[in-house]
Each structure stands twice: as structure tokens, then as C-alpha cells.
Amino acid sequence: MKTVRLPSGEQLPALGQGTWYMGEDRSARKAEVAALQLGLDLGLTLIDTAEMYAEGGAEQVVGEALLGRREQAFLVSKVYPHNASRQGAVAACERSLQRLKTDRIDLYLLHWRGPYPLAETVEAFEALQRAGKIRHWGVSNLDLADMQELRRVPGGAACAANQLLYNLGRRGIEWDLLPWLRERGVPVMAYSPIEQARLLGHKGLQDFARRHGMTPAQAALAWLLAQEGVIAIPKSAHLARVRENAAAREITLTPAQLAELDRLFAPPAGPSDLDML
């Protein structure tokens, strides 16, 4: 199984599980929990969530899925920007821990840039680390200028990851942000790796997948798995789709196949604003 190294040296699976839109419908809770647990069984042990998702509902789903299995998972959650002050981030983390039914979060992220100085948020994260509430901290949806600013903040070089919108159709970070992160050993967590299923309808990707004996989702995930320092976090509440996603780890795209995907989904020709969903 491919792994990605954090700056601390810890190795994480390059394919995990997302939870955006989970926890919004109580009638779907059983299926969502079962999907996450199946993912754990299949080795998709990194689970990403956030206090924003269903206003804590997704964290509750994750907490239920991890009952009796917490040691199997690398758990990621995120703090709202408006909660990312010195005191606010600590209080938000405590609430997340309660919903997750755990005593620690493995990686705690600033969800996007907000009203508080990055230095203040870093201070809060460091306090949470000292208290044993989080093991690592990072960011999400920060562009190159933001990351350069963060690097200048006391303690900012400890940032363990940047979670970004990155998939075949959203390759803008390859121009400058992704190389900058790679040079510093900071992994990218690629959210919406199949563009919330929109990539599955791309005729060129459908044809590529059919000719090469894979599904469009597997092709999109295998492409991300081929990228250095990238962790993909697809979300699914369907057992068959979880199995399909997990099977993408068995696919190694050839140079010719990667070149074909470059022709279908061109890399950036210049700088652009950071894509977000």
C-alpha cells in the first residue's frame, strides 16, 4: 500500500476516507457508519472530517464508526475559521473530541483562512498539542502566499499538511503551490478527488477507464495516487463504492496512461487563483 510521509516522519496511507455531507440525515446514519467501518477493514484508515460538516453531525458519525476501533484510525478534523482564535480553537477542539468520542485528534486543520492572525491560530494549536488533545496540526485551502506567511510565523514550519481541492479537473496547484509544498515535505490532502462525482460523467475519462480495465473513479484516484506527496480522501456511504475506491490502490498507471490523462486534463499553463468548493 502506498504511503505518504508527514514532516514528523509518520507514514499515512495515500488513500483515506472523507465525510463531507455525512451526518445530515439520521436515516442514513447506519449506512454511513457501515461504510466507514468497511473502509477501515480494507485499510482506508485515515478518516477526514470537520466541525463544519453537518455542524458536527459528521464527527458524530465518525465517532460511532470508531467505537472500539479508535487505535486503527488516523483521525483528521478541522476547525472553523471563526473559531480559530487562541481560546476559540481550544474550545472547538474540545467539542469535536466529545462528538468524536475520543481523547485526541491525530491531525487538526484550520479549515480556511479567517479573521484571526495565523500566529494566533498556531499558538492555539501548540497549546492543544501540549495538552495532548492533538498530535499534529495543519491547514486547508491556503494558497501559496498564505503558506509563505505561515512559514514566517513562529512555529509555522511545523505545519503537517495542506488540504486542497485537487483532482484531474482541478490541477491549478501544480503551477506553484504543489512544488513549494513538496520542497518542504508538506503533503497535500486532496479533497473531492472525483469532483463530487462530476468527473465520473466525463466522456474522455469514461473511455480511458473502459479501455484500461478500470472504473472512472478508480482512474481518477489512481492518478492522484501516482502524484508524489498526495493523500486522496474520497467520500462514500455505499459499500460497493468503498470497495471500488479501495481497489484503486492496486492500479499503477503507466507513463503512457499518465500522458493520456494529461491530454484529457491539461496541467496548468500559468498561475491561477486557488480553487475551492
Image (cartoon, grey):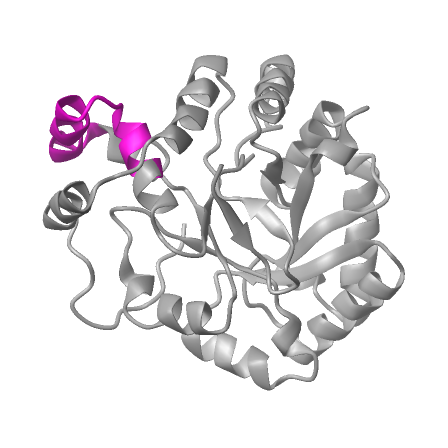
Res. 227 visible in picture: yes
Which secondary structure dominates the residues rendered in magenta?
helix
Residue at 11 percent across and 34 percent down: it is 204
In the image, taking residue 174 as reference, residue 2 lies left or right, namely right
In front: 39, or 228? 228
Look at the picture and state if 142 lies above or below 36: below
Residue at 32 percent across and 73 percent down: it is 176
Q: Quadrant of residue 29?
A: top right
Q: Quadrant of residue 193?
A: top left
Magenta stretch containing residue 135, yes or no? no
What span is in magenta? 201-221
Q: Quadrant of residue 213?
A: top left
Look at the picture and state if 179 lies above or below 31: below
Residue at 40 percent across and 21 percent down: it is 244
Magenta stretch containing residue 208, yes or no? yes
Q: Position of residue 229 (x, y in %)?
A: 45, 56
Look at the picture and state if 129 lies above or below 19: below
Q: How many marks?
A: 0
Residue at 51 percent across and 67 percent down: it is 185
Res. 117 visible in picture: no
Look at the picture and state if 182 lies above or below 241: below
Q: Position of residue 153 (x, y in %)?
A: 64, 84
In front: 32, or 179? 179
Q: Position of residue 5 (x, y in %)?
A: 56, 56
In the image, taking residue 198 as reference, residue 96 lies left or right, namely right
